[in-house]
Amino acid sequence: MKYLEIRLTITPADPWKEIFTSMMGDIGCDSFMDGEDEETLLCYIPAHDYNETALKEVVENHGFPEVQVSYSVQEMPDINWNAEWEAHYQPVMIADRCYIRAPFHPARPDADYEIVIEPKMSFGTAHHATTAQMIQYVLETDMQGKKVLDMGSGTGVLAILAKMRGATGVTAIDNDEWAYRNGLENVAHNDCADIKVLLGDASLLGDIVYDVILANINRNILLQDIPTYVRCLQPGGLLFMSGFYEDPDLAIIRQCCEEHQLQYVSHKVQDRWVAVQFSKI
């Protein structure tokens, strides 16, 4: 797969690099690196997903007068990016209970839950704050016998953990074919082949009603899909969401939820990223 490197120069860098990382993710970039100086952000996108109009909208019409952004784009060498990424992939322990590793890492029999993830650049390896916080919520929540939906499932790590904690009838949905195929591999790796992995978005949700919905996507998609989640959630059911910032996103998400029969329960913050829990009234 051919990749493009989009080099952003962001002045001032703090806190704008994190904000523009999220915005670039929304237009298809799937990996990021700091550049040679603090104002440089390197964003990588599959060439077939690149849209210059969308990029210019982020750079030129972002709506933040206090920050200046410029960009350049270049094609990356045709190398095995998965191999490059795997070489820097490290295992993660969440809350001293859930150990997430690649097949080439040693096992940890002392962990309550061990999940094996094939690292293929799908989002959801627990290295990012949003995934880590969602895993913490899954660990804290009674999943026994619950019907669970994982939206924007990426690697499928949340669905797999829910299944390991006793959930039944687990469904994982992602609109990226790469993530979809990686999710299929990962549920098989973890003896969770009965998890239903689907390629698509919230338009796939029909009349099935869930006890728990997990959605780690981004603010705009969440705002668009919250009414659908509510329709598919049992009264008293739980909705966990992440993929956005504490300020200003949390207040916007909360207002939308409260307009749609959802009651705020709690939230977590890590590196300005938020995960939040609501219950259906």
Image (tube, rainbow, N blue to C red):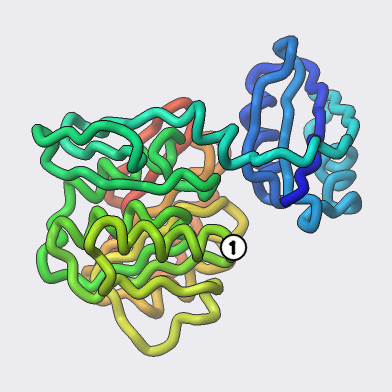
Give the residue pinned by disc 1.
Answer: 176
Horizontal and vertical percent position of residue 169 = 24, 76
Q: Is residue 194 left or right of residue 258?
A: left
Above or below 79: residue 261: below
Q: In the visual, does 207 lie left or right of 177?
A: left
Looking at this view, name the residue that lies furthest to the bottom: 207
Residue displayed at 79% across by 57% down = 48
**Amino acid type of the residue tagged 1 in the rendering:** Asp
Determine the image quadrant of residue 121.
top right
> Quadrant of the image for the C terminus?
bottom left
Q: Residue at x 80, y 36 (%)?
A: 77
Q: Is residue 227 above or below residue 157?
A: below
Please say whether residue 251 is visible from this viewpoint: no
**Quadrant of the rendered image containing residue 209:** bottom left
Residue at horizontal 71%, vertical 42%? Answer: 24
Please tell me whether residue 40 is drawn above or below residue 128 in the rendered image. Answer: above
Q: Position of residue 273 (x, y in %)?
A: 47, 35
Residue 174 position in % (x across, y down): 51, 65
| Residue 43: percent from left, percent from top | 72, 35
Residue at position x 81%, y 28% in the image: 8
